[in-house]
Image (cartoon, rainbow, N blue to C red):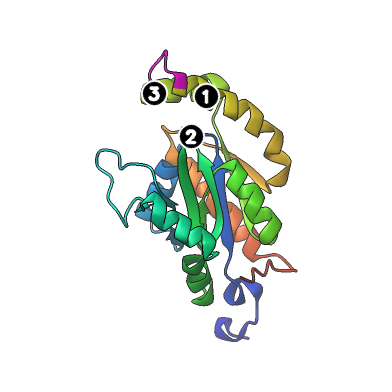
Amino acid sequence: MTRDKLDTAQYKYPLLIVISGYSGVGKDATLDRMKKAGFPFHRVLTATTRPKRQGENDGVDYHFLSEGKFRQMIKANQFLEWAEVYGNYYGVPKQEVREALKKGQDTIVKVDVQGAATIKQVLPDAVFIFLMPPSMSELVNRLEQRYGLASAELDLRLSKAQEEMKSLPLFDYVVINHTDDLDLTVNQISAIVAAEKCRIKPRVVKL
C-alpha cells in the first residue's frame, strides 16, 4: 500500500497545540525559533490592549487593539478565551483558530495558564504543553532583566508563578526551556507532535 492511500490520523486531523508557561519563561522566543526552523504550523496571534513594546509590530507580534474594540469582540463572542492580565486584556481570536484548523493546519496558540485552563474546558482534545524554566532562580534572573531588580512588577509576576504551579496537572506535557538551547526545546515539542500524530485514537478538535 502506498503512502498516499494510507488513511491515518496524522493526515486527517490537525492538532491544536496550546503553549503556556510562566511569564518570562521564553514562550515567544521558542515560537520564533520554531518558525525559523521551518516547523509547519499556523501560529495564532494574540489580541491585546497593552501598548506596543519597542520593535513590536501590529499583525506580526500581536493584534494591538483599543480597549473599546476588544470589548466589542468580547460581546460578539469572538474570542476562544480572553482575560485581563496585569491591567491589560489578552484574547485568542476564535475565527483565526477555526480557519486554520479547517485548512488542515496544525495550529499553535500561546496563552497564560489561566487561558490554558479556559481552553481546556472548551476544547479538551487540544494538546497542552507547559514550558518550564530550568530552575526558579533562572526564572527570577530572566524577570529581573526584563523588569528590574526592585520592581513591583517583578514581585507580582513571581507571586503569580508560584500560584500557577498548582495548575500543572491540566497540561499533557512539560518541556524544560533552556533559553541558551532553544533548538532542544523545539526538538522536544516536535517529538510531542510526532507522538500525537501516531495516536490510535486521534485528538479531534471541533470548533
The amino acid pointed to by label 2 is Tyr
* Front disc: 3 or 2: 2
Question: Which secondary structure dominates the residues rendered in magenta?
Answer: loop
Residue 86 left/right relative to 147: right
Where residue 48 sits: x, y (%)? 41, 49
Mark 3 or 2, nearer chain start: 2
Residue under circle 3? Answer: 147
Q: Secondary structure at mark 1?
A: helix
Q: Residue at x 52, y 43 (%)?
A: 84
Magenta stretch encompasses residue 71:
no
Q: Is residue 188 visible?
A: no
Residue under circle 1? Answer: 156
Where residue 56 sits: x, y (%)? 28, 45
Residue 58 left/right relative to 81: left
The residue segment tinted magenta is 147-152
Mark 1–mark 3 Cα distance, whole angstroms, equals 11 Å
Magenta stretch encompasses residue 151:
yes
The amino acid pointed to by label 1 is Leu
